[in-house]
């Protein structure tokens, strides 16, 4: 058995049965091993940032890692943007990079690059196999690392001779460590703060904020008068009817400071102190008051739910119902506004939908208008590297076994980063409805430019405007095998959404906003 | 004056007047400075690998660097593929990366990444400015580094507060070092080999193989009986009528070994020993005979032309005419083959055209059929990171001041990596004719797969075939504002090429091959 076959068998044994790939010459033995060993679903992405973004979305739904297959340092480079996002979202990815043969690397052939240095920038774990008989064990260690909660990127680099040489050994799966419990003193301390202090915020975040986490946080808040809020950078939030109408810290620094100014004590639950995406001249870098006291109940790598349970017990917090979300909203009419679009999506989404949100500036206010929607999961772009939405939507559809409708609310400028994901959606016939929020500009940047204190002139607009020439998303989608239509009003949007939800196939709606 | 304004003024003073950009929030003060300081042509790319590839193409024609403008570590990540190619092509790029403010970086905000580590993987020079009064000097040093022959990537990282803080100082341009002369003993040694030995190959390569270099090499070869050949990895070759019909080392290892087996002595002229792109089981890694003697006349960073001149003088090699290229070819007929397509392109290309070649497997044999074309420059993809062709074509059109027709011979799979370049071609109304070589598969990989010794089954083909769904390049081009048409025959191709050459605008031809 060669190294490549030991790799595939080890991955399958460890439960990794989906491979997002864009292979190259140095990976042909891995491709052959995949061909000859049944059980792996191989999904092609037409550029590596599609591949890695799909692996991120897959993990968020499946709760277990997929593997990737990338080609040498430059192939890894192309996928680093969405590996950065996966790292920030705490998504587990078994990131496999084929590379030059061990004896060929010193010759500095054209595609040779510092693959390990590239990998270290996004990975919690990096290993380069040295010979075929190590590949199986290294693969088992990579799966173990990627699966370690809260999820991380583990990069396994395979020189091509470790794939084709004989001597491969299939490795048994390695036990995944259970999350550490939070320090009992953290629980006691949080209980003390919640009992004795006013203006306390329970800030939940991290990899996912499930309904069960929300329930415990809400019980604690109700018992103590504390407030509960979600961090801005949360990868997945359970929302809609039967869940907590959970406010989220805003993106903007001014709005965040306004929102958090009344809190004197902030208890961090599976997240880190909230800071601005960027610094701005003369403004604070942190979103919370400088004199607020911060406490950590549980770090993202600890058992967040057990810590909340222990805290609820310590406080003897009784069970209590979530506040009523109210009636399901009605779809909006006429031209789209952020509010009326949010209401329309909330009105129409089917039960158990998945929202892949890369709406950027347009979608800042979507949250409150969607509390009363059907139960759904909302996936956020956590790492800030744009081009996450289309591949995450694609991977999430596969992570949910094609059984749930995915709605990708997608800003146009960001969507152009990874439009190739549409092709994979068509190839795999995935139930993804993409709504392009087409304003023909990098609107977030025009907003940011105003902070500089000037109106953008022609040179600045040459870098901020996308309207010359206009981008026709219907043609782009059709060119990649995805049906599409343009919507000028919310009524047209609603008709197209309803029609797309009836089909087991992707559809794109180019919504003029 | 703030740091950003000192940056723009310093770049302009040093002759950098083109900025390929995809800015983000942390670069808004740079964008404002560009807006307020006349003289910089700012060209937007819709993803960073377009931006960096355009800078590569620009340098190959303009012979001086452009600057880029990228956003934080992830923006740099997205552009690393084509920075790898630029590094391998020895293209000078002033690679400017805006980043987190110095005091914001320790907070590990979502977009924070190890920007310096990423930059080091592709750059000969990396510096992070520490305060506004250093930015001007750092920019001058970056231009000096990027302009140092044979050209290299110089990355300047600008924390946002170094842009917006006052105290910027415009710096004078720094003198660019002239290339070192080759060691005189290398010239004498090469002359000795050429006088006394048989089966000598003069292998020319590096950044560009100009007509003047070819003339000297040909004189030397004619005077001594040596053979002249171009390296496979040459960024730019002067070709066509009035130039040397210069053979190029093949891509494939078997073909290369066959081609080079008769040479016992190889003199390297501005290039490095020819090695395979990849290792293959049981095959050599090097393309030349293991017992051949290698000599370096001039390294790529030395003055190659002066060394050839000194060698010609040492050998008293008389001036001599190039062999006749023969009559200009006739366009082919019917369905395209590699040979008939090459003849058609050679027949139709206007004088002084630029060929941006990312034809990959289909174009391996284009060279001999295009010797008799009008004088032209042929740009090769040197680094092997696919997705180089469309942005290099775009940047080359700008580097040639829109005065020369660019023909991008583009494989479909590679083209999908950076299709967004078409939008910039439309926005800038560039004279680029793209010919997509549409075979609906990663044909190079199907060829490589056969070396594994098996026929690809369904799982392998799921990663190698692009035909399900078929990609409609006409729709993709139209969606980005580029006129396009499909050609099933060479007659149709010829009609479309002729028509496109009459327009000062981009055009795409989707050629079924």
Image (cartoon, coloured by chain):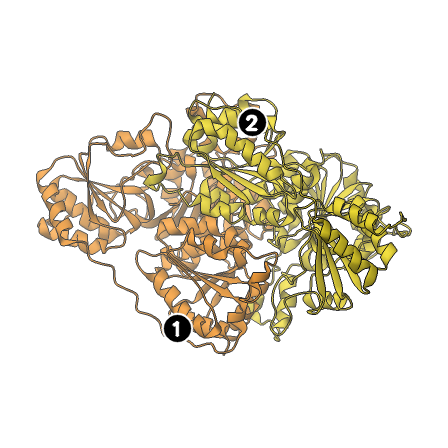
Chain colours: A yellow, B orange
- Residue at mark 2: chain: A
Residue B509 lies left or right of residue A104; in this view the side is right
Q: Quadrant of residue B106?
A: bottom right
Instruction: Say whether residue B412 is left or right of residue A267.
Output: left
**For the residue labelled by badge 1, is the local secondary structure a helix, a strand or a loop?**
helix
Question: Mark 2 — residue?
Answer: A10
Choose between A227 and A55: the one closer to the eye: A227
Q: Position of residue B508 (x, y in %)?
A: 51, 46
Asked if badge 1 and badge 2 are on a common chain, one would say no
In terms of image quadrants, where is residue B273?
top left
Crowding at label 2, few (<14), some or many (≥20) Cα neighbours within 10 Å?
many
Q: Give the SS element for disc 2.
A: helix
Q: Position of residue A511 (x, y in %)?
A: 72, 53
Of circles 1 and 2, which is in front?
2
The residue at the point 71 percent across, 58 percent down is A295
How crowded pointer 1 is (Cα within 10 Å; few <14, some 14-19, many 20+) is rated as some
- Read off the residue under disc 1: B13
Q: Can see residue A77?
A: no
Q: Nearer the viewer, residue B432 or A490?
A: A490
In this rendering, the answer to whether B150 lies above or below B409 is below
The numbered mark at residue B145 is none
Q: Is residue B233 left or right of residue A58?
A: left
Q: Nearer the viewer, residue B207 or B157?
A: B157
User: Residue A392: percent from the left, percent from the top?
Assistant: 65, 44
Could you give the CA–CA distance between mark 1 and mark 2, rounded to whole angstroms? 59 Å
**Tag 1, which chain?**
B
Looking at this view, is B449 or B227 the one in front?
B449
Looking at the picture, does residue B180 appear above or below residue A51? below
């Amino acid at each position: 058995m060669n190294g490549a076959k030991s790799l595939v068998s080890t991955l399958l044994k460890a439960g990794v049965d989906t491979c997002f790939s864009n292979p190259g010459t140095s990976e042909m033995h891995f491709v052959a091993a995949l061909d000859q060993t049944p059980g792996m679903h191989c999904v092609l992405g037409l550029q590596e940032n599609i591949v890695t973004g799909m692996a991120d979305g897959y993990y968020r739904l499946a709760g277990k890692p997929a593997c990737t297959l990338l080609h040498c340092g430059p192939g890894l480079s192309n996928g680093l943007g969405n590996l950065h996002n996966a790292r920030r979202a705490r998504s587990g990815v078994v990131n496999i990079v084929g590379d030059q043969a061990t004896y060929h690397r010193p010759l500095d052939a054209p595609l040779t690059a510092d693959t390990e240095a590239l990998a270290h920038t996004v990975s919690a774990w990096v290993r380069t196999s040295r010979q075929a008989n190590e590949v199986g064990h290294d693969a088992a260690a990579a799966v173990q690392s990627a699966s370690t909660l809260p999820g991380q990127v583990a990069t396994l680099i395979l020189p091509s001779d470790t794939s084709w040489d004989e001597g491969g050994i299939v490795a048994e799966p390695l036990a995944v460590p259970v999350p550490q419990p939070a320090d009992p003193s953290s629980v006691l301390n949080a209980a003390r703060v919640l009992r004795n202090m006013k203006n306390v915020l329970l800030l939940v975040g991290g990899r996912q904020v499930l309904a069960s986490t929300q329930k415990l946080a809400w019980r604690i808040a109700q018992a103590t008068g504390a407030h509960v809020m979600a961090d801005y950078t949360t990868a997945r939030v359970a929302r809609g009817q039967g869940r907590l109408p959970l406010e989220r810290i805003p993106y903007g620094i001014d709005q965040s400071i306004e929102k958090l100014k009344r809190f004197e004590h902030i208890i961090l639950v599976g997240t880190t102190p909230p800071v601005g995406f960027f610094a701005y001249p003369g403004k604070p870098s942190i979103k919370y008051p400088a004199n607020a006291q911060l406490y950590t109940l549980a770090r993202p790598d600890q058992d967040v739910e057990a810590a909340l349970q222990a805290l609820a017990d310590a406080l003897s917090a009784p069970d209590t119902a979530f506040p009523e979300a109210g009636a399901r909203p009605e779809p909006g009419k006429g031209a789209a506004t952020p509010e009326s679009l949010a209401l329309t999506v909330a009105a129409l989404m089917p039960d158990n939908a998945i929202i892949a949100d890369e709406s950027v500036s347009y979608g800042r206010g979507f949250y409150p208008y969607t509390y009363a929607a059907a139960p759904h999961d909302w996936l956020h772009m956590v790492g800030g590297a744009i081009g996450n939405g289309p591949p995450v939507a694609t991977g999430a559809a596969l992570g949910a076994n094609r059984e749930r409708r995915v709605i990708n609310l997608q800003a146009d400028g960001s969507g152009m980063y990874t439009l190739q994901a549409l092709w994979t959606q068509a190839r795999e016939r995935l139930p993804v409805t993409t709504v392009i929020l087409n304003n023909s500009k990098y609107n977030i940047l025009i907003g940011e430019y105003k902070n500089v204190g000037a109106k953008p002139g022609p040179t600045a607009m040459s870098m901020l405007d996308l309207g010359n020439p206009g981008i026709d998303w219907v043609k782009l989608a059709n060119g990649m095998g995805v049906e599409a239509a343009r919507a000028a009003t919310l009524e047209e949007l609603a008709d197209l959404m309803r029609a797309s939800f009836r089909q087991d196939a992707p559809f794109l709606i180019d919504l003029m906003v």
